[in-house]
């Protein structure tokens, strides 16, 4: 059995407005879907575009198992269309399998790739919103700037698990490294009338200079002292952001955080134990 369907619009913004969806996306909309069925297998091939955003996808459904393979090219164009800054020019590729177990969806071998950055996800998402979703995540990236231009130019390696439910999130970080900096531990967040954050974290080394890009700036001959930006705003070398803390949010938040750091480096030639 072969079926084909097409959808077209002169401007996707008109359709989004009709659906009461607030989005900056605009431009022509075109969706073409071709479905083939044989025995217990149904395959759908989709080519879609909305303005500057494009998508190609192939899905195969056999009884309770769905295999999918999709690509969104040129994430920088996606960012420009959605007014999101800093996205890379690389494609986003998604591939994996979802299995319906009756009371949940099991994710098997979900892989997301952006350039040389690779993310692997396995886990279970229950149908009942009151139940807990559990995910195991692995991430590898030779350079974080492959994901966003404003991130530090350091490699990423991570292995962690997450338990997510309504009003609750638990994170178990088996290992996470950003360049020379490492992190492990657990964190829990509970939301409601008040937000509760409990974390027990540990690092053998935190290299703030590397995370800020000090070594890269020195290699480029950038001055170390504070300077004035084109708008006349101070751009000093603070360890953290110069923006004020959100005290209104903090008043409604209970924090219980322990963070043990064996060695702290704030400059390529300075180490604090």
Image: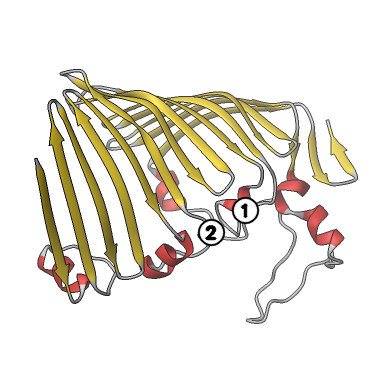
User: Quick check: 206 left or right of 89?
Assistant: right
| Label 2: element kind | loop
Q: Position of residue 108 (x, y in %)?
A: 36, 24
Residue at the image position 71 percent from the left and 52 percent from the top: 212
Q: Which residue position holds label 1?
A: 145
Figure check: 157 above or below 217: above
Q: Quadrant of residue 264?
A: top right
Dot label at residue 88: 2
In this rendering, position of residue 255 left or right of residue 216: left
Q: Residues within 10 Å of mark 2 (few under 14, many from 20)?
A: many
In the image, residue 168 above or below residue 93: above
**Residue appearing at x 10%, y 48% in the figure:** 3
Disc 2 to disc 1, C-alpha distance? 8 Å
Identify the image quadrant of residue 190.
top left
Q: Identify the image quadrant of residue 29.
A: bottom left
Q: Nearer the viewer, residue 7 or 86?
A: 7
How many circles with numbers are drawn on the protein? Answer: 2
Q: Does residue 134 show up?
A: no
Q: Residue at 13%, 36% (x, y): give it.
A: 37
Residue 87 in the figure: left or right of residue 184: left
Instruction: Give yes or no for contact between labels 2 and 1 (Cβ–Cβ under 8 Å).
Output: yes
């Amino acid at each position: 059995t072969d079926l084909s369907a097409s959808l077209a619009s002169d401007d996707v913004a008109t359709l989004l407005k009709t659906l009461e969806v607030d989005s900056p996306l605009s431009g022509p909309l075109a969706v073409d879907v071709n479905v083939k069925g044989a025995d217990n297998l149904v395959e759908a091939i989709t080519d879609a575009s909305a303005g500057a955003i494009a998508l190609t996808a192939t899905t195969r459904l056999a009884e309770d198992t769905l295999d999918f393979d999709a690509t969104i090219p040129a994430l920088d164009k996606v960012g420009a269309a959605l007014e999101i800054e800093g996205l890379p020019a690389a494609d986003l590729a998604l591939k994996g399998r979802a299995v319906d177990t009756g009371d949940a969806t099991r994710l098997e071998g979900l892989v997301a790739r952006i350039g040389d950055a690779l993310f692997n996800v396995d886990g279970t998402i229950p149908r009942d919103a009151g139940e807990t979703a559990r995910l195991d995540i692995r991430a590898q990236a030779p350079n974080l700037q492959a994901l966003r231009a404003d991130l530090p130019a350091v490699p990423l390696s991570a292995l962690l698990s997450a338990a997510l439910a309504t009003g609750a999130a638990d994170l178990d970080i088996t290992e996470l490294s950003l360049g020379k900096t490492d992190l492990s531990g657990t964190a829990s967040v509970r939301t409601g009338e008040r937000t509760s954050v409990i974390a027990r974290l540990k690092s053998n080394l935190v290299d703030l200079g590397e995370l800020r890009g000090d070594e890269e700036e020195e290699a480029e001959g950038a001055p170390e002292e504070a300077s004035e930006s084109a708008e006349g705003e101070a751009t000093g070398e603070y360890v953290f952001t110069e923006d004020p803390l959100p005290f209104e949010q903090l008043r409604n938040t209970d924090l219980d955080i322990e963070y043990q750091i064996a060695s702290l480096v704030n400059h390529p030639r300075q180490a604090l134990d």
